[in-house]
Amino acid sequence: MTTFAAAVSAAHAATCPQVLDFQLPTLTEDARSLCQFSGQVVLVVNTASRCGLTPQDKGLEQLHRKYKDKGLVVLGFPANDFGGQEPGSNKDIANFCEANYGVSFTMFAKSAVVGPAVNPFYARLAEKTGDHPRWNFHKYLIDRSGNEVLSFASEVAPSDPKLVAAIERMLSPQ
């Protein structure tokens, strides 16, 4: 490795928390580095279009709009792991989310969030928290440094005071 390449690699390692050190495709198939969210509070949610909890997309969008200028990023990860409730293609999912809930937060390509084919980001979140999603709309909240990762069950709505308080605490200046 050249000296320049080593310096770039070292700078990347210093600025990107391990929990975010992944590059994953979005619904439009563009690969996106999660490192771009370093320094922000990140709310990660496994979504599904045909779930009784799907109306949580509206609440997630509201959180996104309310707190994005303060440093919150909402990331959606469609998954078909629970009850086959996300059967569509990435294009179908994108159209559904936009048409029904006006979703403007980043949505990644459909992937597994549990099991042997789990996407590596979800494997790391489960490792950090000791908690795997048990259903659609499980939430992980990652602080700005990537050191603190909290887990919230599917039943915890985006407007739940516990989740909102955790977001506001992580967004507040230290």
Image: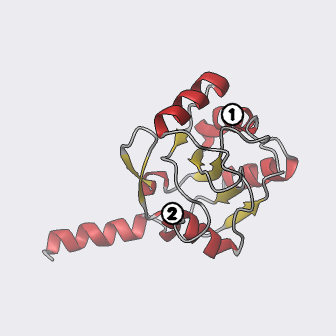
**Which residue does the numbered mark 2 point to in the structure image?**
119
Tell me if residue 154 comes above or below residue 129 in the rendering.
above
| Residue 174 visible here | no
- Kindly indicate the quadrant of the structure image that contains residue 56: top right
| Residue 114 visible here | yes
- Kindly indicate the quadrant of the structure image that contains residue 85: top right
Of helix, strand and loop, which one carries label 2? loop
Q: Which class describes the residues within 10 Å of circle 1: few (<14), some (14-19), or many (20+)?
A: few
Separation of disc 1 and disc 2 at Cα? 29 Å
Mark 1 and 2 residues: CB-CB less than 8 Å, in contact? no
User: Label 1 amino acid?
Assistant: Lys
Where is residue 111? Give x, y as percent: 52, 54
Q: Residue at x 48, y 70 (%)?
A: 18
Q: Residue at x 36, y 43 (%)?
A: 30
Towards the viewer: 117 or 5: 117
Q: Answer with left or right where residue 152 lies relative to residue 15.
A: right
User: Label 2 amino acid?
Assistant: Asn
Q: Which label lies toward us, 1 or 2?
A: 2
**Which residue does the numbered mark 1 point to in the structure image?**
66
Q: Answer with left or right where residue 98 lies relative to residue 130.
A: left
Furthest-right residue in this view: 161
Tell me if residue 59 comes above or below residue 76 in the rendering.
above
Q: Residue at x 53, y 42 (%)?
A: 107
Where is residue 168? Give x, y as percent: 74, 49
